[in-house]
Amino acid sequence: MQKVLLEDLGLVDYQEAWDYQERLLLQNVEAKKARAGRLAETVLSAPPPDERTGIPAGAEAFPAPDTTHHLLYVEHPPVYTLGKSGDIRHVLLDEAEREKRNIRFYRINRGGDITFHGPGQLVVYPILDLEKFYRDIGRYLRNLEEVVILTLKDYGITGGRSPGETGVWIDPEHKGRARKICAIGVRCSRWITMHGLAFNVNTELDYFNGIIPCGIQDKQVTSLQKELRRETPMQEVKEKVKKYFEEVFNVEII
């Protein structure tokens, strides 16, 4: 079973958390390069491949790349982030208005469009080596969604998926009632992931009025607090997400 190191960073500036993710990703990418280089040297100096398996003698002694899985929990001060395929027209507040409301703005290297992060929202950044799981980004996204769907179920809320739209929704099949409770956007380099999911727990939803969330104009945004009509302890939600991340990804979080 794979082990994942969990760090709860608390309230962290977006740029600081982004830089930290990049460092963890780079460490894992460099580890994979080094491991691959050592394996290549061994293969070049090894006896001919086994006739039955085709594997060079001694190559089987090299395990999977020496990478480390991480899971980061954070909350951010108010910030809008625009993915690499996003449309700047989906940002409805100009720079002056954003500055007046103390909202930061970043163009970033994940997939997806514009979204908001702020206090009361649980942001989860998995830094995983997917080669130790599967080489399938679509499956990875569906599994992230499943973690949130199972968490919502514990609160008596039926979360679901909207065809063609990544994230977790409530009533996605009902036009006019569909509302998004969790946005997801990721980046992957050499099968190492970064960025992740933003789960609206006790989020101030008024901030979403300054953007067209995820570029989707005809659907609402919601939060756990709004659906339950009460504030939910963040630590309680974190524990549930941890539990279901272990279950869905078949890992041990430490």
Image (cartoon, rainbow, N blue to C red):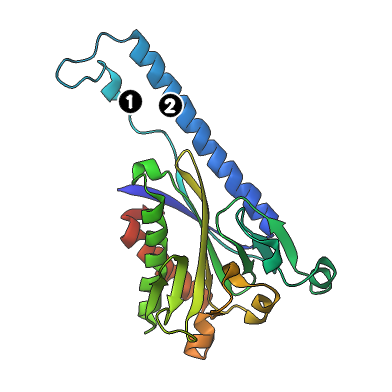
**Which sits earlier in the primary sequence, circle 1 or circle 2?**
2
Pinpoint residue 9: horizontal percent, then vertical percent: 59, 59
Work out whether residue 92 or residue 143 is closer to the camera in this orientation and state it: 92
Pointer 1 local density, CA inside 10 Å: few below 14, some 14–19, many at least 20: few
> Residue at 50% of width from left, 75% of height from top?
181
> Residue at 26% of width from left, 16% of height from top?
56
> Residue at 36% of width from left, 55% of height from top?
139
Q: 163 left or right of 101?
A: left
Pinpoint residue 226: horizontal percent, then vertical percent: 53, 86
Q: Quadrant of the C terminus?
A: bottom left
Vertical arrangement, residue 177 with respect to residue 16, above or below: below
The answer to whether residue 204 is visible is no
Q: 198 left or right of 44?
A: right
Q: According to the image, label 2 marks what residue?
A: 35
Q: Determine contact: label 1, label 2, CB under 8 Å.
A: yes
- Kindly report the distance in space between the C-alpha atoms of the residues bearing marks 1 and 2: 8 Å
Task: Name the residue type under label 2.
Answer: Arg
Q: According to the image, label 1 marks what residue?
A: 62
Q: 96 left or right of 104?
A: right
Task: Name the residue type under label 1.
Answer: Phe
The answer to whether residue 76 is visible is yes
Pinpoint residue 136: horizontal percent, then vertical percent: 37, 48
> Could you say whether the residue bearing mark 2 is in a helix, strand or loop?
helix
* Quadrant of residue 155 within the rendered picture: bottom left
> Could you say whether the residue bearing mark 1 is in a helix, strand or loop?
loop
Pointer 2 local density, CA inside 10 Å: few below 14, some 14–19, many at least 20: some
Residue that sits furthest to the bottom in the current view? 229
